Image: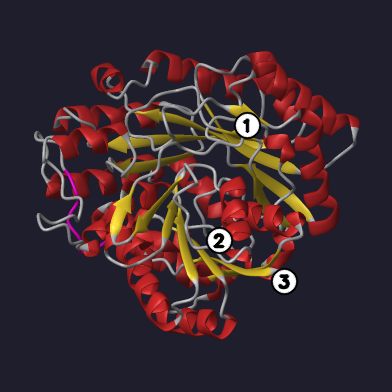
Amino acid sequence: MKVKVLLVNPPDDLEAVLGSGANLVMPLEPLGLLYLAAVLRDSGEADVSVIDAPVEHLSLDELERRIVLHRPDVLGMTVFTSNGGLVLELGRRVRARLPDTLVVLGNVHAAVFAREFLESGACDAVVHGDGEWVLRDIARLVAAGSRDLSGLPAVSSMVDGVFVPHREVARVDDLNQLPFPARDLVRQELYDIPAVSNLPYDGGDGRGVGKHLFTSRGCPNRCTFCTVHHSQKQQFLDVSRTVDEMELLVRDYGANYLFFMDSLFVSRRQRVLDICAEIRRRDLHFRWGCEAHVRFVDAELVRAMAAAGCHDLAFGIESGVQRLLDGVKKHTTPELARAAVEMVKKNSKIKVSGLFILGLPGETLADSLATIRFACSLPLDMAQFSMLVPYPGSEIFYDLRAKEEIDTGVRPDGTLDPTVWRRYSPYIGYTDNEPIWVTPDLTAAQLRWLQKKALRSFYFRPRPFLQQVRRLKLADLRRLVRTAYHTFF
């Protein structure tokens, strides 16, 4: 008898976390869950279903009813900081109503707070690291009539009321062994590029759809604000396997724009050149975007990317102040950032976005203003200015937690106050919440002001303003005006 597995992307709290910024968030297929679903389905040992609550606009009560009607043997949920409180509540409800269902949580936030989620009764297990093979092993145990997960080294669980931590972090050694994500298990019409978004690509003439994919996992860099595990070596899909998925998305899903979600797509130069050559060899026609790094691009690479359809790339520039870049282990300089942006613009028509962070450790008001001036001096097409968030799982988070300088939501008696997690937001200035942490030389009020000043300074200039106006469609004008007002003022 096959095990019934239900994988859930829980409701989000984006309006509480991002305010009007939630209107700019592009709905993305939950690829992490869809990889899990594909592995389980291919094993032949499980019947798998997926619910993506955010894009279906399901409330917590509605999702609970769906889960109870499904009555799965295993319920797997992904946990982000923004929805951690909702998962805590939902997990408790499901375990009370379906005591025979094994509730399993995954993702970085769940791993950081594994003890708290387990001891609060929100789940039966937490998976640490890549979950594909681990969840398959859990399904096999459940099929054999067991709920004892203590033999799985990458799983934290409770045994006789005692927390048993994980012994290792799971990794998929060869990404090419993974099947394509099971995109057919979610409603495709719910995923597309919205008319108003933070993407440089605006949907073009309205035909086709936007999709996203991963071609690697991990990152060679060690930025202290990032939650990519520092022990994780970057792993890559083969070139042919990578372009196979692109071809599938273009041919079977009608995609005309793809975004590569890799933490650093361009880190292996020859591989990118080979991917571009293979796209052209197969005569595939689509536009695409990726995140890049100012130390990993050159003129030849950029020209090859543009010839293969690259429409946009984003550089994590972060700051215009060298001292602050050194403090977060960015290993770049403002001069390198300028040279990279200018080189891309000189050698291609690729649109370039700059990603900046305000409120880095040790940042002063003068530093923030210097970063804003630096951003405006670059030939960027778009810019994002986020507040620093010490996300659980990042080096900064662990450092601040050790110094007891940040509220993690964990109280002295071990209980959780998950409402705190709403304050882990890079755009908290659009909400009534207070930032979770502010560098000592700035105040929360100054950060709110700086974020909006940065956006006004960048976009209220003739060229960037006109570029954004050209993206407008009359039908979306009301929504855009409302979003823009809260964003800039």
> SS at mark 1?
loop
Task: Choose the circle earlier in sequence order: 2 or 3.
Answer: 3
> Along the line of sight, which residue is nearer the eye, 456 or 98?
98
- Magenta span main SS: loop
Of helix, strand and loop, which one carries label 2? loop
Instruction: Tell which circle, 1 or 2, labels the residue nearer the N-terminal end.
Output: 2
Kindly identify which numbered label has been placed on residue 173: 1
Identify the residue at horizontal 32%, vertical 27% (top origin). 319
Amino acid type at mark 2: Pro
Disc 1 and disc 2: Cα gap in Å? 29 Å
Split into 4 quadrants, where in the image is the N terminus?
bottom right
Camera sees residue 489: no
Q: Residue at image x 77%, y 43%?
A: 246
Question: Left of 283 or right of it: where is 19?
Answer: left
When asked about the image quadrant of residue 177, the answer is top right
| Tag in front: 1 or 3 | 3
The magenta span reads 429-437
Q: Which quadrant does the C terminus fall into?
A: bottom left
Specify the label residue 1 is tagged with: 3
Nearer the observer, 379 or 434: 434
Residue 304, horizontal then vertical, whole percent:
74, 22
